[in-house]
Amino acid sequence: MPERILIVDDDQFILAALSQILKQNNYIIQTSPSGDLFLTGLPSEPDLILLDKQLPGMDGVEICKSLKKEDATRHIPVILMSSVAGLKAYAKEAHADDYIEKPFVISNLLKKIRKQIEKRTSQSGRNSGLKWMVGDRRPDTPGPETPALPLAF
């Protein structure tokens, strides 16, 4: 079954572009332009969250801290994204599982996503090896559905 990724970013272009690329790589995508959905609770549990640091209302660092404090959500990998200086320190403060600086190369993001989902899968005891195969290639290698890399945002 394809993994579910929640993308939270206030930039509509980033939401649309990442949604399209990740769907082409066989992920199920849900998006949100703000952290408001965390105030009412996640509608369904994603396998990974791509979270922008700078959001209107609730800051991405605060959202991540909140997720990592709760027993029900601490196991969900969070990749913090931003163009702000010092993102590594913000990610550490937030207890994010990883981070990626904007602009980023899509192949690097796909590798980080795969790494975090495989890590979660292995920790939960599920077999991750078969889940990631897409035909005869992995999701982060160029193929008919993936634009030629490097592609950056």
Image: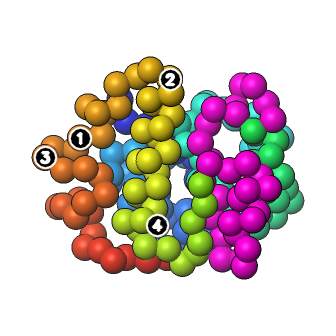
Sequence-wise first label, 2 or 3:
2
Residue indicated by mark 3:
136
**Whole-number angstrom distance, CA of label 2 to CA of label 1:** 19 Å
Q: Residue 24 carries which label?
A: none
Query: Going by the picture, which residue comes out furthest to the left?
Result: 136
Q: Which residue is drawn at 43% across and 73% down?
A: 105
Image: magenta residue range: 69-97
Residue indicated by mark 2:
124
Residue indicated by mark 4:
17
Cβ atoms at labels 2 and 3 below 8 Å apart? no
Q: Residues within 10 Å of mark 3 (few under 14, many from 20)?
A: few
Cβ atoms at labels 1 and 3 below 8 Å apart? yes
Q: How crowded is mark 2: few (under 14 residues within 10 Å), some or many (20 or more)?
A: few
Instruction: Kindly report which numbered mark, 4 or 1, lies closer to the viewer in this rendering.
Output: 1
Q: Is residue 111 magenta?
A: no
Cβ atoms at labels 4 and 2 below 8 Å apart? no
Q: Which residue is drawn at 76% across and 63% down?
A: 90
**Whole-number angstrom distance, CA of label 2 to CA of label 3:** 26 Å
Is residue 38 toward the left or the right of residue 122 in the image?
right
Instruction: Kindly report which numbered mark, 4 or 3, lies closer to the viewer in this rendering.
Output: 3
Nearer the observer, 28 or 152: 152
The structure's colour scheme is rainbow
**Whole-number angstrom distance, CA of label 4 to CA of label 2:** 30 Å
Sequence-wise first label, 4 or 1:
4
Residue indicated by mark 1:
133
Quarter of the figure with residue 58: bottom right
Q: What element carries label 2?
A: loop
Q: What element carries label 3?
A: loop
Sequence-wise first label, 4 or 3:
4
Q: What element carries label 4?
A: helix
